[in-house]
Image: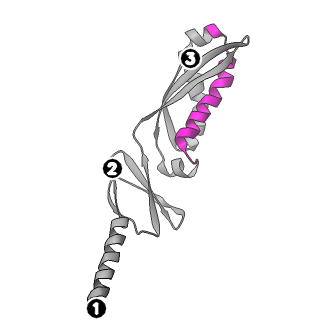
C-alpha cells in the first residue's frame, strides 16, 4: 500500500513539475498572472519555474513584427474612390501593457491604422495620395503612434500604397 501511495505521489509531482517549468526564448518576454492578477516583473529569456496552477505565464514577442492592412476603398478629396493598403512595422516595448491594455494588440493596431487612414486620406486629392504617399504615411504614423504607445507598442514604420 505504501508503494502505491509513493507511485501516485511521484506521478502527481511529475505532472506538477511538467506544468511548472517554462522556457522563454530569446526575443520574448514573459508576464506572469498570479491568481489572475498581473505581477510587476517582466521576465527575461531563460528557464523558469512557474508555480502551476497558481501562476500562468504569457509570452510576448519583442522582436519587430509586420502587419499588413488590406486594401481599403477610401474617398479622397473631390469624392473620388481610391484603394489604399498599408504595411506597418512595430515592436512591443512594454509586455505588461501589451497584455493588459488591449485584448489583441495586433488586430487592434490593424483596426487603428485602417480607421486613421480614412480621414487623413480624405483630406487629400487623388494626385496627392498617389504622389505624396510618404508624407501621408508619416501623418498616419504620427496619428497612430500615441495610441500604440499606450498599448506598449512602438511603430517602427508605416507605409501606405495606392493601387
For discs 3 and 2, the disc positioned in front in the rendered view: 2
Q: Nearer the viewer, residue 9 or 30?
A: 9
User: Which of disc 1 and disc 3 is earlier in sequence?
Assistant: 1
- Image quadrant of residue 63? top left
Q: Nearer the viewer, residue 13 or 137?
A: 13
Residue 157 coordinates in the image, percent (x, y): 48, 27
Q: Is residue 113 magenta?
A: yes
- Image quadrant of residue 77? top right
For discs 2 and 1, the disc positioned in front in the rendered view: 1
Query: CB atoms at circles 3 and 2 under 8 Å apart?
Result: no
- Image quadrant of residue 80? top right
Q: Does 95 sit above or below residue 52? A: above
| Magenta highlight range | 103-127
* Number of other residues with Cα within 10 Å of mark 1, as a class: few under 14, some 14 to 19, many 20 or more: few
- The residues tagged by marks 3 and 1 sit, at their Cα atoms, a distance apart of 76 Å
- The residue lying furthest to the left in this view is 3
Q: Which residue is drawn at the image coordinates 66% and 24% (left, top)?
A: 118
Q: Which residue is drawn at the image coordinates 61% and 10% (left, top)?
A: 128
Q: Does 80 sit above or below residue 65? A: above
* Number of other residues with Cα within 10 Å of mark 3, as a class: few under 14, some 14 to 19, many 20 or more: some
Q: Main secondary structure of the magenta part?
A: helix
In the rendering, which numbered label is found on residue 2? Answer: 1
Q: Which residue is drawn at the image coordinates 41% and 36% (left, top)?
A: 64
User: Which of disc 1 and disc 2 is earlier in sequence?
Assistant: 1
Residue 7 coordinates in the image, percent (x, y): 28, 82
Residue 26 coordinates in the image, percent (x, y): 32, 47
In the rendering, which numbered label is found on residue 25? Answer: 2
For discs 3 and 1, the disc positioned in front in the rendered view: 1
User: Which of disc 2 and disc 3 is earlier in sequence?
Assistant: 2
In the rendering, which numbered label is found on residue 135? Answer: 3
- The residue lying furthest to the right in this view is 79
Amino acid at each position: 500500500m505504501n508503494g502505491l501511495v509513493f507511485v501516485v505521489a511521484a506521478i502527481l509531482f511529475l505532472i506538477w513539475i511538467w506544468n511548472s517549468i517554462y522556457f522563454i526564448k530569446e526575443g520574448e518576454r514573459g508576464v506572469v498572472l498570479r491568481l489572475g492578477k498581473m505581477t510587476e516583473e517582466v521576465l527575461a529569456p531563460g528557464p523558469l519555474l512557474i508555480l502551476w496552477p497558481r501562476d500562468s505565464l504569457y509570452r510576448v514577442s519583442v522582436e519587430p513584427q509586420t502587419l499588413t492592412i488590406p486594401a481599403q476603398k477610401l474617398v479622397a478629396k473631390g469624392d473620388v474612390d481610391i484603394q489604399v493598403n498599408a504595411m506597418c512595422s512595430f515592436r512591443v516595448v512594454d509586455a505588461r501593457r501589451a497584455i493588459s491594455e488591449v485584448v489583441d494588440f495586433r488586430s487592434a493596431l490593424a483596426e487603428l491604422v485602417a480607421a486613421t487612414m480614412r480621414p487623413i486620406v480624405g483630406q487629400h486629392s487623388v494626385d496627392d495620395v498617389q504622389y505624396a504617399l510618404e508624407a501621408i504615411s508619416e501623418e498616419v504614423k504620427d496619428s497612430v503612434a500615441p495610441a500604440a504607445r499606450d498599448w506598449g507598442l512602438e511603430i517602427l514604420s508605416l507605409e501606405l500604397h495606392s493601387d
